[in-house]
Image (cartoon, rainbow, N blue to C red):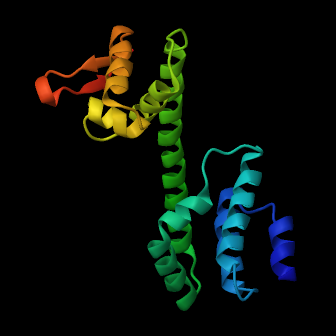
Amino acid sequence: MRRFLEWFNGDVTTEPVLRAAQAHLWFVTIHPFGDGNGRIARAIADKALARSEGSSQRFYSMSAQIRQERADYYRMLEQTQQGTMEITSWMEWFLRCLTRAIEGAQTALSGVIAKARYWEKLRDVPLNERQRLVINRLLDGFEGKLTTSTWAALTKSSQDTALRDIQQLVEHGVLVRNPAGGRSTSYSLAVL
């Protein structure tokens, strides 16, 4: 562990992102504790990545991505540790995993930004808590048809209250009525 820490804190020759991949592998291979080595190795990788960026803020988590890809992660670790300790395949896997973590964060941030912009456009529209709740659900990708029954169930309100809430949003241009009518009447979030 002493040699690992000296290398981790002192190596300035290895490209920092590659050092993050190596540090993770070396720590989990050393396996100094009976439990928690994987969590610590992920934290070490995240720390090394943060150092490489010279920023205290990051919008992606390598640790979370590794947990999502747990089966491939363990397969790659075993393949690397059981072989000759040739780490090229591990490094390639780590970099691809890092790429997916960054891409996933970009997708999530795009959604957050789009949602914030939508709410900015609604800043002058008077909304009650039920309306805010349902609009948030719709912005978060609610699946299914938004009907008065669905609204009532989501907001734990009566059908009459649901209909009033929906009609107010239609009047303000926040919701639009879908083409099918009658008992199939449903609504969608308007593009603002």
Q: Residue 169: x and y, percent?
A: 38, 16
Q: Nearer the viewer, residue 111 or 140?
A: 140
* For residue 161, side relative to residue 80 (left or right): left
* For residue 80, side relative to residue 1 (left or right): left
User: In the rendered view, would you say 102 is above or below 75?
Assistant: above
The residue at 72%/43% (across/down) is: 57
Task: Give the quadrant of the C terminus.
Answer: top left
Quadrant in the picture for residue 6: bottom right
Q: Nearer the viewer, residue 173 or 56?
A: 173
* For residue 10, side relative to residue 185 (left or right): right
Q: Nearer the viewer, residue 142 or 59?
A: 142
Q: Residue 19: x and y, percent?
A: 70, 64
Q: How many marks?
A: 0
Q: Residue 9: x and y, percent?
A: 85, 66
Q: Residue 144: x and y, percent?
A: 26, 40
- Would you say residue 174 is visible in this rendering? no
- Would you say residue 111 is visible in this rendering? yes
Task: Give the quadrant of the N terminus.
Answer: bottom right
The residue at 69%/55% (across/down) is: 49
* For residue 30, side relative to residue 184 (left or right): right
The residue at 37%/24% (across/down) is: 161
User: In the rendered view, would you say 8 is above or below 177?
Assistant: below
The residue at 18%/26% (across/down) is: 185
